Image (spheres, rainbow, N blue to C red):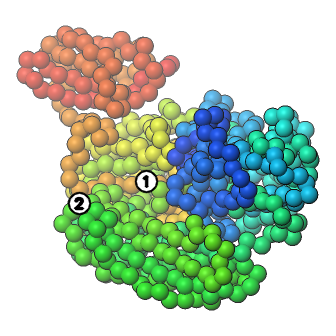
Amino acid sequence: MRGIIAISVFVFITEKLFAQEEVLPLPFNTAAAKSNSPHASVRNALSLPFVDDFSYRGSIPDPNLWMDHQAFVNTTFPLNPPSIGVATLDGLNERGEPYDSASYSELSIGSADTLTSQPILLGGLTSANNVYLSFYFQAGGLGDFPNDSTFNAYNYDVHEGDSLILEFKDNTGTWRHIWGVDGMPGDGLSNKNFYQRIIQLTDPSFFHDDFQFRFRNIATLIGQYDCWNIDYVKLGSGRNPGDTVLSDVAIQYFPTCILKNYRLMPWNQFQDFQATEKASGIDLTVKNDFIVAKNTSKQMQANETTTSTFLFDSGVSGDNFDPGESKILQFSSFDIPNFNSDSVVIATSFAISATGGTGNTSNDTITRYQVFHNEMAYDDGTPEAVYRLLGSPASVAQQYIVNEPDTLRAVEILFAHTDVNMSSNLFNLLVWDRIVPNTSEADTLLFDEFQLPEFKDELNGFAFYRLSRPIPVSDTFYIGWMQVSLQTDYKIDVGFDKNDTANQHLFYNVDGTWQPSELAGAVMMRPVLGKEIPFGVGIPDVKNNDEVSIFPNPATDILFVTANDSDLKLEVMDYSGRILMSEKNQSSLNIHQLAAGFYFLHVTDLRSGKTSIHKFIKTSQ
């Protein structure tokens, strides 16, 4: 957890000092599910060969091949992988939360993720059968580069800093260390390269019908730090030390978006504006892993999934690939008819086929779904890092442009678990219609105070902040936050997508002047537009009543309510709208028993029926 790109106004305990904004390694995993231990109910004895290149849809390892779900199967973290999809090991648990959620210390280092194979039938084999395991690994990729450290509790033949470890299970059920590597620079690792290892099974104790192998990592346990990407795992007999050629032509990266300016946008903002919003073409990156040239055919088809409307077929054409060459195959854009709907889903499907292929077809096809609903987004939904603005007061503003007048209803933000406890770090949510770079000029449309970061109980979950009132927008507007505190180390950490570049739309202000961001990527903050959002989605609407006020705010023990009438009903609600306390004919509430956090007080005048909702913060001190 040492690789931080920083521009910070305060001294930050890393290599980088005195800058204004920074991107950190990602603090949480985007896998759909994880587990701290193998699922004992799933024990599918496998026969050789065992092959997995993680090129399937979904974010958990194939349960037919792997026992646990801790590794994150994804297409966004690797650089130059042999084929699309890798399994990433990090420092998070099955819910995308840090294994150590208490210390917030980068010195908290230990065993983290595990990727364990299903049992494999090796009982009828011996070392004479030349059984070899091969795999590719990459340190970091677009995630945090694993570094060496002074942690040395395991006594293996690596430095045991931020390490990747391979173990085999013998016939006594004992896991035995086979291989390991850490991220220290002396080992010559680069975050841009995949390295292949091939290891022979020679010990007689490994040839039994409950053989398993597993990868695991030693990592900083407070977030998605110290990432290792694993790809193309092969265990088979009749191999030799030189059996390292994949003999495969594979899709290498996720195809590009059909949109030019955004990754998500409402259908009404797209349908009549395709000339400026639609990408001129779609790119698919393919890699020839053969040691000989290969001719490869390609094809793309598109359809609208909710209505099953056929849209486009590129037809079949071919490209020649040199040995080891990675090439971008280009497809033309296509016309999309108008759909009378608020939600439209366009599926673009791609297929390749190489002459003399090996039969591994899982990496030969892929589909990308383009969803049009009520969000606008520059990001692809998967953060590889963390955006952090240091200092207070400090503000961030992200620009959006609508093609026709619309209504801004809410803002979604993906907050990141990191080395900072943000549970009580207040921020103000803002909307602007004008910001002038390199000046202090800005026109504010909305200023919603007393917000707290919310961490969703789901991976890649965005917190939903309903605005205190709907905001009409036309042309250009900005959404963002302001952090205000007397603490010089005050931080708000938000997910940062390194696969999509939108910093030309991002501005920050730490000294009274709006500066354009220089950090390539997209801050994961999205406006929600369109029709009124039903109550119960996100936080409740805030209703104003000038006759009612509450104090103090924040409050520790007693919350007082002043009103023209004392015949009141007071209800304390949590962020989801659940009622936690209810009192009648009271002018104060004892909130000492509430946990520290963000709440709403729903006040009802029992005589007039007039109601209001007030935000308040409960503190522990």
Tell which circle, 2 or 1, labels the residue nearer the N-terminal end: 2
Residue positioned 40% across, 37% down in the render? 451
Q: Please state the horizontal and vertical placement of residue 52, each as a whole percent of the image.
A: 66, 59
Left or right: where does residue 272 sit relative to residue 245? left
Residue positioned 43% across, 46% down in the render? 462
Pointer 1 residue: 525
Left or right: where does residue 270 sit relative to residue 329? left
The three-letter code of the residue at mark 2 reads Asp
Left or right: where does residue 173 sit relative to residue 84? right
Q: How many numbered tags mark residues here?
A: 2
Q: Please state the horizontal and vertical placement of residue 265, each as a whole percent of the image.
A: 33, 63
Task: Indicate the quadrant where residue 264 lies.
Answer: bottom left
Question: Is disc 1 placed on a helix, strand or loop?
Answer: strand
Mark seen at residue 342: 2
Q: CA distance from mark 2 to mark 1?
A: 21 Å
Task: Indicate the quadrant where residue 487 lies.
Answer: top right
